[in-house]
Image: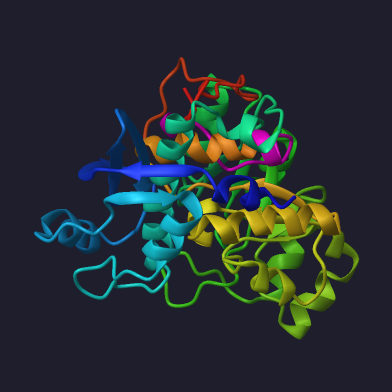
Amino acid sequence: MANFDRLADLPLTIESHELSGQQADVSSGFMRMTTTISVSGAGQSGSGEDVTYDNEDHEALQAWGAPLPLAGEWTLGSFCEALEALELFPQPPLREISRNYRIWGFESAALDLALRQAGQSLCGRLALEPAPLRFVCSLRLGEPPEILAPLQQRLALYPQLEFKLDPTPAWDEATLEEIASSGAAVVLDFKGLYEGTEVDTPADPDFYQRVLAVLTDTWIEDPKLTPEIDAVLTDARSRITWDANINSVADIDALPFQPTMVNIKPSRFGPLSELFRAYDVCNERGIAMYGGGQFELGVGRGQIQYLASCFHPDGPNDVAPTGYNDPQVLAGLAASPLPVAVSTVGFQWQ
């Protein structure tokens, strides 16, 4: 049975819903805002997190006077179908992908509530055994002359920490050699699919060749496959993985070749039915998976850790505890792998 089919017929009673915001300065140098969505009914409450990136969209949602028509007697499947037909933005979102982020926030809250009302856990309902969760720290290094400082500061506190790093042209030979000698780089995110952003990297085959000649054992995430770069990566295709372009099963189907592994970010998929279908498809095709975060500030971080522990606990999961994303990381954070911490009922990671 498909995973979502195991969930769709869960009874769901919703009497009310509430929204609350949170914000924090994060390591990428911007004020991150998210919205916690709480749905309640039959003496229980479930929570999810809208991880839309544009703060204006959160402010508009939280100021919206008209409550959404969520109250009623549903199954989880019928609720999701009705929700996906609603307009969830009081004004058009600044980015179209934000519609998926908001759907994820509401549907993950509804999943949590439906499971609590049934007295079941997500892993129990799906007959899955969660496992200790390997995670990596996603990090963009500094600028010369302190380019390695963010990496060094974290490794000084957590010598076994693994990283997903964003290569940039500022990485000279000495930088590459020190990263290689640390043995800490697991994924190199070339961000080749971004255009017109602050994190774009050049589609320069010499840049790719220079980086990969030194860092020979890492995963290569989101390369820009121009003919010249594709030629550089011919012998490394088994190491190529995809992230920014994976929002649906159709996106996996559209890749230029079947990948060894893909990054499944739950919030990017939006509807629960599409997310769990992606898990099914990857398992059927033998495509390995890892999970990714979206600078969650609340319950959403634990929920993506929960899913990763069930579906791909051994992958290079970009789901580190939130403290690893702080501008100045402190001692005392949980180390990888995270012990299993699923709630006895519902969809929460304790």
Does residue 270 lie above or below 164 as drawn?
A: below
Question: Is residue 325 in view?
Answer: no
Residue appearing at x 30%, y 37% in the figure: 41
Q: Nearer the viewer, residue 324 or 269?
A: 269
Instruction: Find residue 50 and report its horizontal and vertical position in percent.
Output: 35, 51
- In the current view of this chain or complex, which residue is farthest to the bottom? 227
Q: Which residues are magenta?
A: 309-324
Q: Nearer the viewer, residue 104 or 244?
A: 104
Q: Nearer the viewer, residue 44 or 305?
A: 44
In the drawing, does residue 296 fall left or right of residue 293? left
Instruction: Find residue 216 and report its horizontal and vertical position in percent.
Output: 82, 51
Q: What is the basis of the colouring in this image? A: rainbow
Question: Is residue 79 in view?
Answer: yes
Residue appearing at x 59%, y 69% in the figure: 245
Instruction: Find residue 206 and report its horizontal and vertical position in percent.
Output: 72, 72
In the drawing, does residue 87 fall left or right of residue 323? left
Instruction: Find residue 210 and report its horizontal and vertical position in percent.
Output: 74, 62
Residue appearing at x 66%, y 31% in the figure: 134
Q: Is residue 165 magenta?
A: no
Residue 54 sits in which quadrant?
A: bottom left
Residue 185 sits in which quadrant?
A: top right
Q: Nearer the viewer, residue 6 or 108?
A: 6
Q: What secondary structure characterizes most of the magenta part?
A: loop
In the drawing, does residue 93 fall left or right of residue 66? right
- In the current view of this chain or complex, which residue is farthest to the front? 73
- How many numbered markers are drawn? 0
Does residue 129 lie above or below 226 as drawn?
A: above
Residue appearing at x 53%, y 61% in the figure: 269
- In the current view of this chain or complex, which residue is farthest to the top? 332
